[in-house]
Structures are given as C-alpha cells and as structure tokens.
Image (spheres, rainbow, N blue to C red):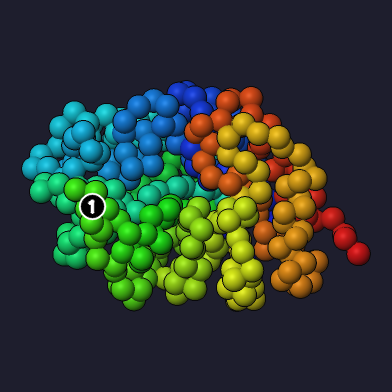
Amino acid sequence: MTQPWPAGSATGLGSLPGTDPAEATRLIFGELPDLPHLPELPARGAGADMIGRAVSLLVDLPVEIVPSGWRLTARAGRDLRVARDFLSRDLDALQEVAGDYTGALKLQACGPWTLAAAVELPTGHRVVSDHGATRELGASLAEGLSRHLAEVQARVPGARLVLQLDEPSLPAVLAGAVKTPSGWGTVRSVQDNVVEQLLGDVLALAPAGGRLVHCCAPEVPIALLRGAGADAIALDATLLTGRHTDAIGELLEGGGAVLLGVVPSSDDRITIAAARDRILRLWNDLAFDDARLGSAIVPTPSCGMAGASPGYARKAMEVLREVGHGLLEDRS
C-alpha cells in the first residue's frame, strides 16, 4: 500500500505546549513539512484537550463538564460552546497558515473506545459500560468526524488527509480495566470483535492509505487494529517488547507503516543518534530490506508534547525531521 506521505517523513502526534494556534501551526509546517498535523493545545483549558476536541465533534449528543470529567447531558451549554470555539479557531489558523498547502495532512481525534471510556452517562457511569450507548456515541463521533474531514478538505483543498484515532484506553477496554464510578470495581471487558467493528466503522471515514491508530499503552492490540482497517499504527518505541515484533512485521509485510515514538515527549536529553538507534534496533529485528526503511517507519515523539517546554518541542521536531530524512540513506 502506498501511504499519502513521502518516504523519509516525520510527524508529531497531536498536542503541543502553548496557547496560540497560528504559532503552533506555523511551527509544525515549518519543522515537519512532509507530514504536518493539526495541533492540539490543551494549555488553553478544558475543551482544548483530546477529549474536549472529540466531544466538540459529536452530533446530537451534548455534553457538559462535571467534577469527574465530561458527561452527556440534555442540552448543549457553555462548556460545549467553548470546546467548539477552540476547534474553530484551530481551523481558522490552519487555513490562514496552510490554505495553499499540497501534500499529506494529519488530523487527530480521540477514538470511539477511549472516548467511551472517558465520557460519562447521566448516571455517572462510563459510556463504555452500556453497549447501546457506546454504539450511539460511536455513530455520533463518526458523523462529526465526517463533517470535520470535509471542512478541513474545503479549507485546505490540496491536502491528502490522514486520520489518526487516539486510543490510549483501548487495552483497558479489552482487559476490563476501566474503573467504575466508585473506583472499587471495573467495567466488564468488551469482546475483540465488537471493538474491531466500531473502530473500523470510524476509520473507514478516512481515505484508504490514511487510516491510522495511535496507542501509547504497553499492550497494543496490533492485530486487532489491523483487522479494523488501520493502514498504520503509532507506537511508543520504549514500550515495545519482543512479542510485538511479529505483529509489526505482519503489518509492514501487508504494506502498512509504523509511526514510531523515538523522541521523549517532555523535556529530556535528545539526540539524532539515540532516536535513529531505536529505529534501527527494531528494523534489524524485523530483518527487512533496508531499502524499505524510509517508507515503512515514520519517526515521532513518544506521545503528545503538551507537557514539554516550547524550546524542547521545537528541538524535538528538528531532530525528528533529520532522523526521517536520514532513513533514506543507503546503509549498505
């Protein structure tokens, strides 16, 4: 499968420090020009984070903020208006900075299972505890994402859109580890085929080749994500073990790609050599032809960089860009 981004690309995973969407967008398009992304800026407050952006996309499912988080409610109020305003400002900044851009452009959204594990029913229980409510939430998210993709395409007509679904809570959903309101119990696990079906329905909104799932948890269900239709999977290199190698190899053998988190997401020591070494260790274990390396692996931070300093975030992008370009070099 041919990915919509060029070989040797690098990218970010979503969140950045700061509160100015135009500044963040200029930084991304300047430092990660081969696969830029729409930034998330959680420092602006509730509604600007991953869950806030996702609930702002929901259609006919209003939510509000309660002390424990986001909760479904009868009618939209100020909290939802703020979240939607944040997204509107982000899209205005994207159009202003990159309206004439041509190339791959990545959008991030919370996936349906992590969203269902985070948002509460009016009773206080998580949506994921109710299969009917989860299906309704997934359908609402899918409709909202469809509209979101169409709006971004209209604002940046030359973009080849890539959809990244963030599913950090997916392993907990599968393992029955999502906490109940009391904190003493957990929600019953959800069957693999049910998870795969709903995730696949949402992924199918994106163009073929541009369907991506990001999971920064240790127990990433790689085979399930492939079954749901993911063309690429974003993983934290520091969490990979030998048992992941075969699944990653099957993904790449089938024409997929791996976005590999090789740079710490918050202020730390950072070098091109260390980031490159993490990629090469995995690649040597996979034993694929070196000629495929630049198209199969996309270097990224280990996770979102909202907790980093602005200077570190810029440096991290510079390193990632250099590492990505370096993967095109002949290693023979």
What residue sits 19% from the left and 28% below the top? 78
Q: Secondary structure at mark 1?
A: loop
What residue sits 91% from the left and 64% below the top? 332
Q: Is residue 1 visible?
A: no
**Quarter of the image holding residue 267?**
top right
Query: With 330 as the anchor, is 68 left or right in this view?
Result: left
Q: Nearer the viewer, residue 8 or 161?
A: 8
Whether 297 is drawn above or below 71: the answer is below
What residue sits 47% from the left and 28% below the top? 21
What is the total number of numbered labels drawn onto the structure image?
1
Inspect the image, locate mark 1, and give the three-letter code of the amino acid beneath it.
Trp
**Quarter of the image holding residue 329?**
bottom right
User: Which residue is tagged 1?
Assistant: 184
Q: Is residue 204 visible?
A: yes
Residue 193 x/y as whole percent: 34, 76
Query: With 207 as the anchor, is 299 left or right in this view?
Result: right
Whether 182 is drawn above or below 220: the answer is above
